[in-house]
Image: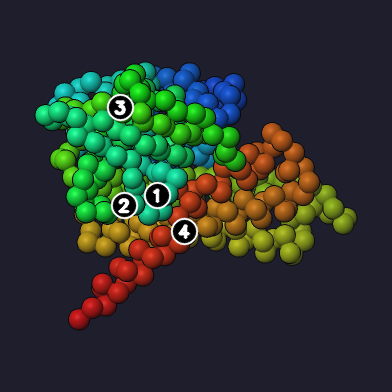
């Protein structure tokens, strides 16, 4: 952690969290089945009070606090980080836009680790272009709809206990005709399947065959669902960068340790100038990404006018940096890092997805350019 942006108490808390994660959460993660929800791990996140930090009783969740939480977890156990982040992503639309009854029913269960959430936005034809979603909410009597269609690449699907589902209730194509619904997993007509993905975390499809929903299931307002999605993603986007920074730091630490103990060409690897320069480049990029993530989170917490640009920059730089650093760490280790079960083999599979989800790298560049043009307008 850097002393530039963090208070000593924050640095101390992050160190304690890393130690707790290694001691209590990593063993549970190692017992989990790749591609499936690890409910003992989710329950432990609840028992340790970490999930409750996503839903503070004394005010809104601070983006910087979320970033510190995700970075610290990721540095020691990516499965624990992802399990926590997915609970927040799936449940935060309820916090921000749900009714009192919806919040009372689900938020305590999510915070305790007893209920697992999903955020169901992406579709086969609507990934980066989320406004193009086509899941149909067809009118069904007064104040009701039937959901018909499919969602794809949904984290925690199809095992989640409920999902925040975004469907098209009418209006012109685009963001204006989208409504968010809170859909429990036991609704008739709702099924799904697991997807075998590169990353080890649970991800799958959801299929809606006339799934009934009512006004009581709407999150926010009818037709206001795209705003529900964007408000959630705007909060979580900088913390995707924090997740990436945590992985990059873990890879850098592993490379430093290996370079100091591995002997080659008559001495330790660290004495080779090419390796030393590579480590210096890795460390500089990690620190740059970390500071940009912290700056974006602080801007969100201040409600600064340039949140969109800062958040996009943070996610862009941090995820691209993590990919570079993990790859460089693998190169320094050589073939041993490619063996199944090695930390870097695990990170190599984990690090690719964040460059795509919650807005791909290309989308972030488009957002940044758009914001630059807006700021330059006379």
Q: Residues within 10 Å of mark 2 (few under 14, many from 20)?
A: some
Which label number is shown at residue 126?
A: 1
Q: Is residue 15 visible?
A: no
Circle 1/circle 2 CB separation < 8 Å:
yes
Is residue 174 rendered to the left or right of residue 275?
left
> Which comes sooner in the sequence, label 4 or label 3?
3
* Residue located 69% across and 33% down the image: 341
Q: Residues within 10 Å of mark 3 (few under 14, many from 20)?
A: some
Q: Residues within 10 Å of mark 1 (few under 14, many from 20)?
A: some
Which label number is shown at residue 131?
A: 2
Measured Cα–Cα span from mark 4 to mark 3: 34 Å
Q: Tell me the quarter of the image containing the C terminus.
A: bottom left
Q: Quadrant of residue 142?
A: top left
> Which comes sooner in the sequence, label 2 or label 3?
2
* Residue located 21% across and 31% down the image: 145
Q: Nearer the viewer, residue 225 or 245?
A: 225
Nearer to us of marks 2 and 3 is 3
Q: Which residue is mark 3?
A: 211
Nearer to us of marks 4 and 3 is 3
Q: Nearer the viewer, residue 141 or 376?
A: 141
Residue 81 appears at what percent x and percent y? Answer: 47, 35
Measured Cα–Cα span from mark 1 to mark 2: 7 Å
- Label 2: state its secondary structure: helix
Q: Which residue is mark 4?
A: 361
Is residue 161 rendered to the left or right of residue 269?
left
């Amino acid at each position: 952690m850097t002393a530039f942006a963090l208070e000593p108490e924050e640095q101390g808390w992050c160190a304690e969290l890393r130690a707790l994660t290694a001691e209590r959460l990593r063993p549970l993660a190692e017992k989990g089945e790749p591609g499936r929800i690890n409910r003992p791990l989710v329950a432990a996140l609840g028992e340790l009070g970490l999930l409750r930090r996503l839903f503070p009783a004394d005010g809104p969740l601070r983006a910087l606090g979320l970033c510190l939480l995700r970075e610290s977890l990721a540095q020691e156990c990516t499965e624990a980080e992802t399990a926590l982040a997915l609970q927040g992503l799936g449940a935060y639309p309820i916090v921000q836009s749900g009714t009192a009854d919806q919040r009372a029913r689900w938020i305590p269960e999510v915070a305790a680790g007893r209920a697992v959430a999903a955020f169901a936005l992406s579709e086969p034809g609507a990934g980066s272009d989320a406004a193009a979603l086509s899941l149909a909410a067809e009118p069904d009597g007064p104040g009701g709809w039937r959901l018909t269609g499919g969602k794809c690449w949904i984290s925690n699907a199809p095992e989640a206990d409920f999902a925040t589902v975004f469907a098209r209730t009418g209006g012109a194509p685009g963001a204006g005709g989208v409504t968010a619904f809170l859909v429990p997993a036991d609704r008739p007509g709702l099924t799904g399947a697991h997807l075998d993905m590169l990353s080890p975390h649970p991800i799958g499809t959801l299929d809606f065959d006339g799934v009934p929903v009512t006004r009581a299931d709407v999150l926010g307002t009818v037709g206001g669902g795209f705003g529900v999605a964007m408000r959630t993603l705007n909060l979580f986007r900088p913390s995707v960068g924090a997740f990436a920074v945590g992985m990059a730091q873990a890879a850098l630490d592993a490379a430093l340790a290996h370079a100091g103990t591995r002997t080659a060409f008559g001495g330790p690897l660290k004495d080779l100038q090419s390796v030393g320069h590579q480590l210096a480049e890795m460390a500089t990029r990690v620190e740059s990404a970390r500071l940009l993530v912290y700056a974006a989170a602080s801007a969100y917490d201040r409600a600064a006018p340039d949140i969109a640009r800062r958040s996009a920059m943070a996610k862009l730089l941090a995820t691209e940096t993590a990919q570079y650093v993990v790859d460089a760490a693998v190169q320094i280790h050589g073939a041993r890092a490619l063996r199944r079960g090695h930390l870097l083999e695990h990170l190599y599979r984990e690090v690719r997805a964040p460059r795509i989800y919650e807005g791909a790298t290309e989308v972030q560049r488009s957002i940044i350019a758009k914001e630059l043009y807006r700021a330059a307008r006379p």
